Structures are given as C-alpha cells and as structure tokens.
Amino acid sequence: MNLILYSLPLFIALIIVEWLVSFFLKRPVFRLNDSISDLSCGILDRLLALFWAAGAFNIYYYLFKEFHFFESFKEQSILNWTLLFFLVDLIYYWFHRCAHSINFLWATHVVHHSSEEFNLTVALRQGPLQGMFSLFFYLPLALLGFNPAMFFVVKMINTILQFWFHTRLIKSLGPLEWILNTPSHHRLHHAKDSQYLDCNFAGVLIIWDKLFGTFKREEFEPHYGITSEIKSFNPLWAIFSPWIVMASRMLAAPGLQGLLVPLAPPGWRYRDEQLPAPQNIEKRYDPPLSGAKKIYFGAHFLVILLLTITFLMKEAALSGLDRIFLTLALSYLLFVLGHYLDDQKIWPLEGLRLGILGLVFYLLI
C-alpha cells in the first residue's frame, strides 16, 4: 500500500490550515507562484516513481531473498520494527549528508532546496531522481534480512514524518528539540546564509546531527533557497537544470578535470573555472502576476492536481501506454504552467494546452 499517496489528503488539509493561520497572523509565508512550483515538482516526483518503484522493490527483494544474513530480522516483531526505524533514519541522515557533498547526488536533491520560501508545500517539492539513487544506501538492510514489506512501510513512514517540520509558524517545541528534528532545526537546513550552510541533515531524529557533529541551533530566521538560484518556477527546469549545469561544467573543464565534477563537492571548482557572481540573498525571484492571472493559473493548477490524484489512484488498472501518455501529458501541462508563472509569452500554445487538459480529463473522469 502506498502510504504517501493515501497521506495526500492530510498533507493538503495541513497546507490549507497553515495558509489560514498565516493569513490571520498576517505573516506572508506563501506565494502562489512558488507554491504551485513546489507542488508541481511533487507531482512529477510521484508520476516518475510509477516507472521505477517496482524495480526498486524487485532489487531489494532479490537481495533479501538470495543473500540475507540473519533469519531473526525477518520476523515482524516490535523489536525488529523499532530497530528498522532507527536504521532507516540513520541511513537517511548519511544519504542526505552525501547528497549535499557530492555533485551528482546534489543534482537529485537540490530540487527540494531551490524554493525561496519555507512552508508545507516545500515539503512536497521533491526531485524525481532522488529515490532511485537513495535506494542503494538502503540495500544493506536487505542483506541484513529485513523483510521488504517492513522496509518499504518504514521508509514511507519516515518520509511522511518529515512533512510537518517545513513551516515558519512553529518557533520552538521545548524538550522535543533535544531529540526530534523540528521546524526550528530544519529551517537552518534550508538556509542559504553562510552561517547555516550544511547542517541539520536529520530525517526524523536530530540525534544523528548531534552525534556526528553537524548540528546547529537557530539564532535568527534564515533566508531560504540555494546560493545559485535557478530563477524559474518551471518544475522541469528545477529538476533538470542541475544536470545541465553539471554537464556543461564537465565539457568546459580542461583535460580530465571534467571527470571530477560529478564526484566533487558542490562548491568545488576546477582550475581557472570562473566563479558565479554572488547573489543578494535578500532578493527573491518573483515575476509580477496580475490578480486575474493568479485566479486563472491557480484554478488550472487545482484541476491538474485533482487529475493527478485520480491518475495515481487508478494507475494500477491502466495500460502501460495510458500511463506513459498521461505522465507526458500532465508533465507538459505543468511545463506550460511553469512558463506562465515565469511570465514567459507562450499564449499561442494555450489552445494546445487546453486541448490536452480536456483529453486527460476525458480519459480519467
């Protein structure tokens, strides 16, 4: 059972609650263009997972079946569930830390950090390629003998529990801050201020950062985003631009230095490489949108979101060709919508977009 899919109504309800609270407190923590971009990345993450999730399960299951070392871990006891929860969270910490330290892993993860806001929609801003790469960090659990069903349930629970601390509205949780990852801790992880870079990599438990020396405490509310902003609300550009930048750096590097780029830390530069110009961390990318456009784009995004949820609920009954078409169609709709949010002039394609939207609606409803 896909626990993340069935958690979507709860996620959406909490996003609405956060928006209402921020509205009444007069704290503008949401921007429509940014939130649509966040959720669009999340949609693409779930759509592309349809094509690799089964393969990930099969790889884990094969190693578990053929090579597991300990029979005792196969049992679904309270002790094994608890131990697996701690191991999954520990492995997530190390994957997460590596994803900030190795360029090709950073390219899979940077999508989650490229929003300049910090709210619950950012929690759903995920890179579709991250899950494929992170799987290899968890495969030792299969070799130890942890049941595949247990592992994937615990992994989904670990992901779901990381949703709630993407908010600016909760300041401190007192003694819980000693053990759990919380909004205060995680805000620093999304910061682009130099004082807060590369800290608080925890998933659910902050104890790993304290144990391995990467913990920092919040002293002031940070500026959010990455040091080299992508300056776009287009989800496809957010997902693929890091790979384009990395490839261009590899091709431009002298000699064999280009081979080092994917394995080097994100801040590494090859000999004579020009450093990007420093950016004003207080200035946010925010093309102007009229009230009418906000209503139009917001309404169309809600339609795309509902169609996506319907697709994900029905996908097991659809043919492979239908899945491919619907994935490409929904991706195209989000791509065009992202262009509009960037104030790009592509209105001549509006008829094609509406036609595809109508076709997707016909196939799913």
Image: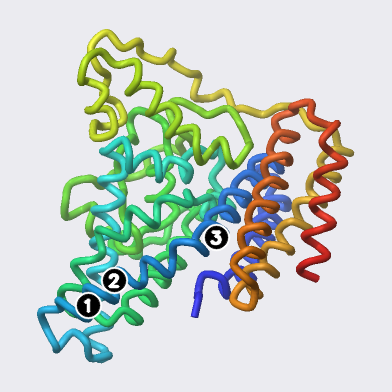
- In this view, the mark in front (2 or 3): 2
Q: Can you give x and y, in whole percent of width and height, for residue 360 in the image?
A: 77, 60
Residue placed furthest toward the left: 69
Q: Residues within 10 Å of mark 3 (few under 14, many from 20)?
A: many
Q: Quadrant of residue 312?
A: bottom right
Q: Position of residue 272 (x, y in %)?
A: 27, 8
Q: Which three-letter amino acid code belongs to the residue tagged 3?
A: Arg
Between 309 and 83, the one lying in front of the other is 309
Q: Residue at x 68, y 38 (%)?
A: 338
Nearer to the camera, 104 or 26: 104
| Quarter-of-image position of residue 76 | bottom left
What amino acid does circle 1 point to?
Answer: Phe
Which secondary structure, mark 3?
Answer: helix
Q: Quadrant of the C terminus?
A: bottom right
Residue visible at 50% across and 75% down in the picture: 3
Q: CA distance from mark 3 to mark 1?
A: 25 Å
Residue 60 bears which disc, if any? 2
Residue appearing at x 67%, y 57% in the figure: 325
Asked if the residue under mark 2 is in contact with the one under mark 1, i.e. CB atoms within 8 Å, the reply is yes
Disc 1 designates what residue? 64
Q: Is residue 224 above or below residue 212?
A: above
Upstream in sequence: badge 2 or badge 3: 3
Q: Is residue 94 above or below residue 27?
A: below
* Secondary-structure class at tag 2: helix
N-terminal label among 3 and 1: 3
The image position of residue 320, as x and y in percent, is 59, 67
Residues packed near mark 2 inside 10 Å, few (<14), some (14 to 19) or many (20 plus): many
Q: Residue at x 27, y 55 (%)?
A: 93
Crowd class of label 1 (few under 14; some 14 to 19; many from 20; radius 10 Å): many
Q: Would you say 357 lies left or right of 281 here?
A: right
Mark sitting on residue 227: none
Q: Which residue is mark 3?
A: 46
